[in-house]
Image (tube, rainbow, N blue to C red):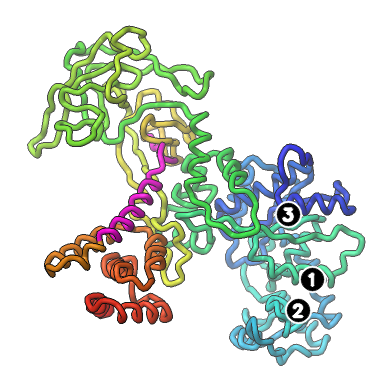
């Protein structure tokens, strides 16, 4: 690997150090070891990029190994999905392996441990074992079965394998150290009884190895040089090495476990259990729902493999867990699609625009650039006629405030076409505008080079030709959760933060050329965002998914919420200067109403924490937050914080004490 082109991350430095101290470069071998109990998510994409990227950089083989040791949760469907995702990301594996390939060898090694007096069958209940295991500060207590005779252990273990016992009646434990400060070393479980059908071995086995027993030994059997995993496995490293010591690696390559930080993504969850819950409870429409953080969901939404690899490279490898804002991922896909996606026009909320001075029955063919970022993208032909459709919110009959689009008497340019001026509107019985009348300047054709075409107008808007436009279902996907860390709040169910507007479906109109669009095609709908053709689409019904909007509206909303908090604090200063009780009440009601609009729970928590101080304005602000926003519940404040807060209020203004009592009631 060349170290001149880029600086090394700490994982690469580990490898370089090993090579410098005697490891043969030809002995390098990496692996990606998913458990087939769900679909891969964005966190896996980073791990895939790391392991397969190392394989590319060091020209070393990489195994795809399935950790299929729990048949209760694993399915062939997940195996197939994982292989599909890894291949789609652009990577090839050297060997396709399964922990189940090694079941017999793992069993034989377990028998060897029993024979050496380093493993025993425990017949306690799980509750009894949990109680005797101790705590991080107190040592555990030996199991009453810890000193069973070797012969008895061998007999019981063989009968466990033969299926003679019910689930939960016996387990096999390693005999290590019940007083170890690392609780994972306190006689960990090696095998448990499971009478479940395995997707590869069928009913051959009635006992299955635990992850810690199977993982390191699988690495050893495959000749893996470096076993990279996330930080939660750091305490497991001692056990990983202990097991390798017991089987004796001899002169063969001994795998080395090293850890890197998990990179969590904001406004989503990556726990397979929680992703499965979203699927089972119908919050989403399957594992590949475009709102899911799964690779399958992101692919269906329109993300490219290049954008996910770029994201993984951008966030890098670290030693500390961190929350990455989803806007970083969205930036990566915008940057990629900006260079590659053809530009087209679509109208999502159409209102008719009638060009009154354009001849009836006549149709023009205009030329439109496909992608100004790609010189080789060429041009396409679009049709223009007397009746068009534009976005409803691109027109305002009577302008109020700043509005730079079409209005009565105002002019705009139609993208790739002419300058038009609105003259009148048609309305239905309810006063809703059904059509806009306008005139066009025939000398103003975009790109024609005429003086009229160079004329500056307020804005350029998109449109489609009413005669040729195609109806399409447009699925407007947004972030699945309102809070940046939906599963980080112990006192709350993450489902409370599901965004009720994460999917809006509209019927829009797209330009005629999209009739040839096929599943997976990606486009930029000009002025609207990036969209792709969904897998539900057919010849008779076009369906597009919004991949991402052109701009990050969430960043703007976040700034608005922060400003709302800051401005509310400033306004509260007036409360203690007011002498009229009605004015005080009105001010509090107004501020409570404003603060109740904030849906970012993490931001609310930060505001509470920041203002938990001996200042009556700050204390009043906290009271307003708890009484005005449904996301905050005073009863859930931890006892120590509540005691501190109530003490501060008691020493403050009597009016605050009244509000607090009302809140507690």
Front residue (pair 66, 305): 305
Whole-number angstrom distance, CA of label 1 to CA of label 2: 9 Å
Q: Secondary structure at mark 3?
A: strand
Quadrant of the snapshot with the C terminus: bottom left
Q: Position of residue 303 (x, y in %)?
A: 51, 41
Whole-number angstrom distance, CA of label 3 to CA of label 2: 26 Å
Q: Secondary structure at mark 1?
A: helix
Question: Which residues make up the magenta segment?
Answer: 542-571
Residue under numbered circle 1:
243
Residue under numbered circle 3:
97
Most extreme residue toward the front is 577
Q: Residue at x 63, y 58 (%)?
A: 261
Q: Is residue 514 above or below residue 314?
A: above
Going from N to C along the chain, the mark reached first, 1 or 3, is 3
Q: Position of residue 410 (x, y in %)?
A: 19, 23
Quadrant of the snapshot with the N terminus: top right
The residue carrying pointer 1 sits among few (fewer than 14), some (14 to 19) or many (20 or more) residues within 10 Å by Cα, namely: some
Going from N to C along the chain, the mark reached first, 1 or 2, is 2
Residue under numbered circle 2:
174
Q: Decide: marks 3, 2 in contact (CB < 8 A)?
A: no
Q: Residue at x 51, y 54 (%)?
A: 265
Q: Residue at x 25, y 10 (%)?
A: 442
Q: Within the image, what quadrant is residue 343 found in?
A: top left
Q: Within the image, what quadrant is residue 633 found in?
A: bottom left
Marker disc for residue 483: none
Q: State yes or no: residue 561 in magenta.
A: yes
Whole-number angstrom distance, CA of label 1 to CA of label 3: 21 Å
Left or right of 77 on screen, residue 8? right
């Amino acid at each position: 690997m060349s170290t001149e082109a880029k600086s090394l991350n700490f994982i690469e430095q580990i490898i370089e150090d090993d090579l410098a101290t005697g490891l043969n470069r030809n002995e390098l071998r990496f692996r990606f070891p998913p458990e087939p109990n769900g679909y891969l998510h964005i966190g896996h994409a980073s791990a895939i990029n790391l392991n397969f990227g190392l394989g590319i950089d060091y020209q070393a083989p990489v195994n795809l190994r399935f950790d299929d040791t729990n048949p209760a949760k694993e399915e062939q469907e997940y195996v197939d999905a994982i292989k599909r995702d890894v291949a789609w990301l652009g990577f090839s594996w050297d060997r396709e392996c399964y922990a189940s390939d090694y079941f017999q060898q793992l069993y034989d090694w377990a028998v060897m441990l029993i024979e050496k007096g380093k493993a025993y069958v425990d017949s306690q209940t799980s509750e009894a074992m949990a109680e005797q295991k101790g705590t991080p500060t107190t040592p555990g207590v030996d199991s009453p079965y810890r000193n069973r005779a070797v012969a008895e252990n061998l007999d019981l273990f063989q009968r466990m394998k033969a299926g003679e016992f019910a689930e939960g009646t016996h387990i096999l434990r390693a005999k290590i150290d019940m007083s170890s400060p690392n609780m994972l070393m306190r006689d960990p479980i090696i095998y448990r009884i499971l009478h479940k059908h395995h997707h590869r071995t069928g009913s051959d086995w009635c006992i299955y190895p635990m992850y810690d027993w199977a993982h390191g030994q699988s690495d050893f059997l495959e000749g893996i040089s470096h076993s990279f995993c996330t930080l939660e496995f750091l305490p497991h490293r001692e056990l990983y090495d202990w097991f390798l010591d017991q089987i004796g690696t001899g002169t063969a390559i001994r795998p080395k476990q090293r850890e890197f930080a998990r990179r969590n993504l904001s406004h989503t969850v990556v726990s397979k259990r929680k992703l499965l819950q979203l699927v089972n409870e119908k919050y989403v429409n399957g594992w590949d729902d475009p709102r899911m953080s799964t690779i399958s969901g992101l692919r269906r939404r329109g993300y490219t493999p290049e954008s996910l690899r770029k994201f993984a490279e951008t966030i890098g490898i670290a030693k500390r867990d961190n929350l990455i804002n989803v806007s970083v991922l969205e930036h990566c896909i915008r940057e990629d699609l900006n260079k590659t996606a053809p530009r087209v026009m679509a109208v999502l909320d159409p209102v008719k625009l009638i060009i009154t001075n354009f001849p009836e029955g006549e149709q023009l063919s205009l030329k439109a650039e496909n992608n100004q970022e790609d010189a080789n993208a060429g041009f396409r032909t679009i049709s223009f006629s007397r009746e068009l459709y534009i976005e409803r919110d691109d027109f305002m009959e009577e302008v109020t405030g700043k509005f730079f689009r079409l209005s009565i008497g105002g002019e705009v340019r139609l993208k790739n076409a002419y300058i038009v001026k609105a003259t009148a509107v048609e309305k239905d019985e309810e006063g809703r505008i059904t059509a806009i009348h306008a005139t066009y300047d025939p000398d103003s054709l975009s790109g024609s080079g005429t003086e009229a075409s160079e004329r500056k107008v307020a804005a350029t808007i998109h449109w489609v030709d009413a005669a040729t436009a195609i109806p399409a279902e447009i699925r407007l996907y947004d972030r699945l959760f309102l809070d940046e860390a939906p599963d980080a709040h112990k006192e709350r169910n993450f489902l409370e933060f599901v965004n009720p507007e994460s999917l809006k479906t509209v019927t829009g109109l797209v330009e005629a050329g999209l009739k040839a669009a096929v599943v997976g095609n990606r486009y930029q709908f000009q002025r609207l965002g990036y969209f792709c053709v969904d897998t539900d689409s057919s010849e008779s019904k076009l369906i597009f998914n919004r991949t991402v909007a052109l701009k990050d509206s969430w960043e703007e909303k976040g700034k608005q919420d922060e400003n709302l908090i800051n401005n509310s604090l400033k306004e509260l200063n007036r409360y203690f200067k007011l002498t009229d009780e009605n004015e005080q009440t009105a001010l509090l009601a107004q501020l409570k109403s404003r603060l109740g609009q904030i849906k970012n729970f993490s931001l609310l928590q930060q505001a509470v924490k920041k203002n938990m101080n001996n200042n009556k304005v700050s204390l009043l602000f906290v009271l307003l937050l708890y009484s005005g926003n449904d996301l905050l519940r005073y009863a859930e404040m931890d006892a120590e914080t509540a005691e501190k807060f109530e003490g501060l209020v008691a020493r403050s203004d009597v009016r605050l004490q009244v509000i607090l009592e009302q809140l507690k009631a």
